[in-house]
Every structure is written in structure tokens, then in C-alpha cells.
Image (cartoon, rainbow, N blue to C red):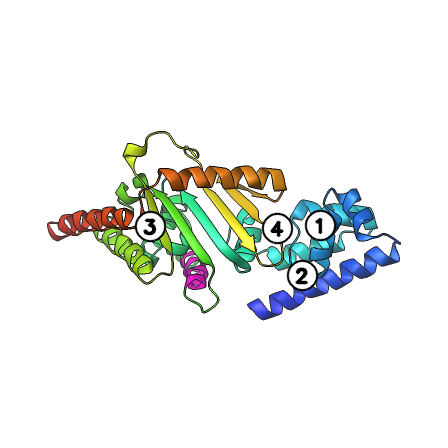
Amino acid sequence: MANGSRQAAWEFFGLELKRRREDAGLTQVELGLRVFVSGGYIGQFEQAIRKPQLDVAQRIDEALQTDGIFERMWRQLIDDRRYAEYFAATAELERLATVLCDFEPFVIPGLLQTAEYARAITLASNPFAPEGHIEEIVAARLERAQLLRGDTRPLYWAILHETALRVPVGGPAVMARQLRQLTMLSRERHALVLVLPYTAGAHAQMGKSLRLMEFADAPPTAYTEAVYSGNLLDDPAVVKRTRAAYDLLRVAALPPEASLALIESAAEDYERCASTT
């Protein structure tokens, strides 16, 4: 589904939610109390500013006795087999973000990946998948990466642990090209990439990835990921804590130029290794 038609479908979701809510004689605040979100969130759902999570759509069906219509619409709009189910809602939200901040302890973030790197990562976790499925996932990741190249691109911060630079995903040649892409995106000011070096020692997100998203007309969210699961967090107190953790990572990371120098040095090491094999 194209972005324009998908947004139109979400607008229909919002209009239908408003109609059903009013038919039930409920205000936004009253419905919000029944589904455990604020009345302001209900208003943002109705205006298609923000998309509800699946459990919220299910609770709306229960509160309005709508026989599962909002869950079915949610699944149709969010379901995209190119993305893991737990990441699909976040993939939708990142298109609306004005600021994106990623931290990755082990891999290059998806928005910064080359096709070769993305393919190597995908194959490692899907060794028996058909070739068409692998290509579909890689194509989706590259499509997402276009977000950083548009005129309305978000401000994008990426903090990588040095481990992500040192694990030779796909081999030395693939890693060299991947790291060169990081430096290019940084030099062209499409992204601000920082490196958390080994020498930083213990840090605020040991072994855990983190993404923060800010929006023009909606509260910020955070996303964390574990084994075949993800959590999209929008509780203001929790999001505030994740932002504080990210600030600690920023303080511990190398400055921008020193980070680029480390990335370029690692790329040169891989290039030398590739030339001798």
C-alpha cells in the first residue's frame, strides 16, 4: 500500500472511531479511561496523527462493542510481511517523526545499512528462507533508508557501540563499504553518527538497543527490542527515563569528528584485509 493511500486509510480509521464513539455517547476522555489511554490520545487517533497499538485497538472494540472492526482495520493497515510484526507499528511511526535517535550495541542501524550488509544480517537470521523473501526484506530496509535522503527528512542521531564496527558482517569488503557509507551520510549531514568506544566501559544501555522518536503534533515515543519481540513505549514517565538514558550515551560517546575518525580507521582496516584475500 502506498504511503498516501495508507494515510487515507488511517484517516478513515479515525473518522470511524469518532463516529462509533459519538454513537456510544462517550467523550474522548471517557473512552480513553476505558481503554487506558488519555483523551488526548483518542483525539490523535481520530485525527490520524497517531496510530494506536494493537492492544489499544482491541480494547476500543471491547469498549465500543464493535465486533473487532478496529482490530481488523489495524491488522490490515499495519500488517506488512516485510517487517516483523512487533516492528511494523514503529516502521509506520518513523515516517512521521521529526527527530529519530537510535542506539545499537551490536549492529549498524537499519536506516544506515547498505544492501550487502542488510542481506548478510537477514541471511544470518533466516538461513532457510526462500531467496524472494530475503530480497523482500532487504528491499524494505533500503526503502526505509530513503527517509534520510528526502527534503523533509528527520534529524537523525545514531550512537553505535564500537562492537558494531568490529564484527565483520558479510566479510571485510562488505564492512568496508558499510563503514564508508556511514562516513558519507555523516559528511553530507544526513545523519549524526557517534561511536561509543570500548574504553567507555559500562554504559546506560548495556546490551540493549533503543530508539527515540519525536513528532510535530504528538508526544514522543521510545522503542526497545529483544529476541523476536519489541516494545513501543508511550507512557510519558517511561519515555522520559529512556531519553535520560540516551543523554548518558551521548555524554559517553566520542565527539562527532573523533567518531568519524574511528569509523574511517576501521574502514581502512577492512579494506586492507579485503585486498589481501
Report the residue marked by disc 1.
57
The x, y position of residue 3, in whole percent, is 56, 67
Residue found 82% across the figure and 55% down from its top: 21
Report the residue marked by disc 4.
219
Rendered position, 95 above or below 38: below
Q: Residue furthest top?
A: 202
User: What is the quadrant of the N terminus in the image?
Assistant: bottom right
Distance between mark 1 and mark 2 Cα atoms: 13 Å
Residue depth check, mark 1 versus mark 2: number of the one nearer the observer: 2
Distance between mark 3 and mark 2 Cα atoms: 36 Å
The x, y position of residue 56, in whole percent, is 70, 47
Residue depth check, mark 3 versus mark 2: number of the one nearer the observer: 2
138 within the magenta span: yes
Residue depth check, mark 2 versus mark 4: number of the one nearer the observer: 4
The x, y position of residue 148, in whole percent, is 42, 62
Q: Residue furthest left?
A: 276
Q: What amino acid is found at the position of numbered circle 1 in the picture?
A: Ala
Distance between mark 4 and mark 3 Cα atoms: 35 Å
Asked which secondary structure carries label 3, the reply is helix
Report the residue marked by disc 3.
120
Q: What amino acid is found at the position of numbered circle 2 in the picture?
A: Ala
Q: What amino acid is found at the position of numbered circle 3 in the picture?
A: Ala
Residue depth check, mark 3 versus mark 1: number of the one nearer the observer: 1
Residue found 82% across the figure and 47% down from its top: 30
Report the residue marked by disc 2.
48
Number of residues whose C-alpha sits closer than 10 Å to that of mark 1, classed few (under 14), some (14–19) or many (20 or more): many
Asked which secondary structure carries label 4, the reply is loop
Q: What amino acid is found at the position of numbered circle 4 in the picture?
A: Pro
Distance between mark 1 and mark 4 Cα atoms: 19 Å
Residue depth check, mark 1 versus mark 4: number of the one nearer the observer: 4
From the viewer's side, name the closer residue of 86 and 233: 233
* Residues drawn in magenta: 135-148
